[in-house]
Image (spheres, helix red, strand yellow):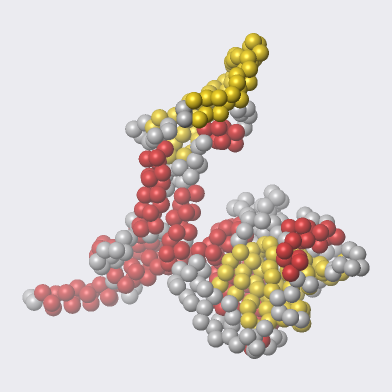
Amino acid sequence: MDISISIVIFALNISQMSNVVSEQLRKEIDTYLINNPIDRNQDHPYAPVALIFSVEPEYVRNRFRKLRKKGSIVSKEAVENIVTKVAAKLEIEKGRFSVKENGNAEVNLVTPKRIKTEKDLIEAAEIDLNIWNIVSWEIGTWEGYRADKQKDLEWHGGKATGFVKDSGKIVTETLYRVNIKLSPRKIGNDIGLQKEAVIAELKAYSPIIKNNFNIEPEQRTCLLEIATFDLHLGSLSWGKESGENYDIEIAERRFKKSVQDLLKRVNLSQVERILFPIGNDLMNIDNKNNMTVNGTVVDTDVRFIKMLKVARRIMIETIDELSMIAPVDVVVVPGNHDGTVSLVLGEILDAWYHNNEKVTINNSPRTRKYYEYGIVGIQFTHGDNEAHHDLGLIFANEQKDLWARTSQRFAQLGHFHKNKKINYVSVDEFQGFQVQILPTLSSATAWADKKGYSSLKQAKAFLFDRVDGLIGEFTTTA
């Protein structure tokens, strides 16, 4: 038989089989891809896997891309880059520490520095935690003795001038003898390195998108803020118990409808930039134990990882949609429910939009974030820690230049699940600021219902002019 005909027949057979890929086979292919990262620098990288499972290379490619998008797989290149970086640092460390054949190291030192904690230990031994894991450590002390001498010497051309004053006394000094056992960080079992590899892969995957908006300054002079605080994705409410049902699907529907409603209320031809604060208890739990960041167990209707994946998808969909209108500035504000996981989401978004000039991500670990637009200065904080009457002073102290440059200043808070404004003026000759406690889209939980806490399910949008400041406020009710 002609070779070309054989190839065609083989391709047809593969095509027929891949059209009816079973769920079990799909799982086997996914597992194989996760455990055997594909090197896309090679010719026809998906063909060998396709031959193993008798499917089309295009099917393998699609599965590979979906797994990468979900964060389940990291490319071989990203892993190798991280491993190479750590190995290079390890070679430098071998000059300082006693490194064994298996890569483990042992450090022995004597120091007069007081060592009581692991942090003291790390500083005294200058251990780079990007390279090493501390396996164990021991500290012993003993009394050392030295002459009580005071030296005041200067060296010039190899000769010393000055004096040495010897009191003739012997000084007792406590010395610390430290033994530390280290093991090198390995990507196979190190979550931190795996995170670095995932972030590197996302940044490599991030498409390059230029800011090509043709904005006429005289036409677009406004900032649109979409403020959807305290969504509590994953929160669970049962209507018979708390008066209203609420779960992750209801939360997503309310959120998307609210964003659409708010956009319909605004003349988008005026909008130069969009401000999109996220976090502020966007998610209901902070870990897989259904706990908030402070360790409180709360009612939850989904697994932690599913909640995070849904939040990631919704945020990316929304940011992409907003970026079609104008450049988007995302500000991540940790809440008292999602204090850590909101920052994780911020890292994912920062990597995802790494090469996108239309989107900026402010994921600073600081509790309070600030934003400036024309005469407007905005302070973002969740509101569960600071005394509200102190926020203006905190603003002026933390952001002196921003305070001086702006004449309309706002502090925007979530947490309280209500809509409230408070105006403060410290003294007559100074400009004041406004504290805005923004509403929530989430339903009351059984605990909140017991306490009698209830509120309208609302979201807000604000329109700020560069010269005139706040010129519009819009509300949507779920």
* Residue at point 64%, 63% (across, down): 332
In x, y percent, where is residue 69?
45, 66
Q: Please name whichever residue, 477 or 376, is drawn nearer the observer in this view of the structure.
A: 376
The answer to whether residue 259 of the structure is visible from this angle is yes
Q: Residue 368's image quarter?
A: bottom right
In x, y percent, where is residue 203?
46, 64
Q: Report the number of numbered marks.
A: 0
* Residue at point 65%, 11% (across, down): 169
Depicted 293 relative to depicted 307: above or below: above
Q: Please name whichever residue, 224 or 89, is drawn nearer the observer in this view of the structure.
A: 89
Q: Residue 67's image quarter?
A: bottom left
Residue positioned most to the right: 428
Horizontally, is 158 left or right of 359 in the view? Answer: left
Q: Quadrant of the C terminus?
A: bottom right
Depicted 2 relative to depicted 365: above or below: below
Horizontally, is 24 left or right of 9 in the view? Answer: right
Q: Quadrant of the N terminus?
A: bottom left
The answer to whether residue 317 of the structure is visible from this angle is no
Q: Residue 256's image quarter?
A: bottom right
In x, y percent, where is residue 353?
51, 69
Depicted 410 relative to depicted 215: above or below: above
* Residue at point 44%, 45% (across, down): 189
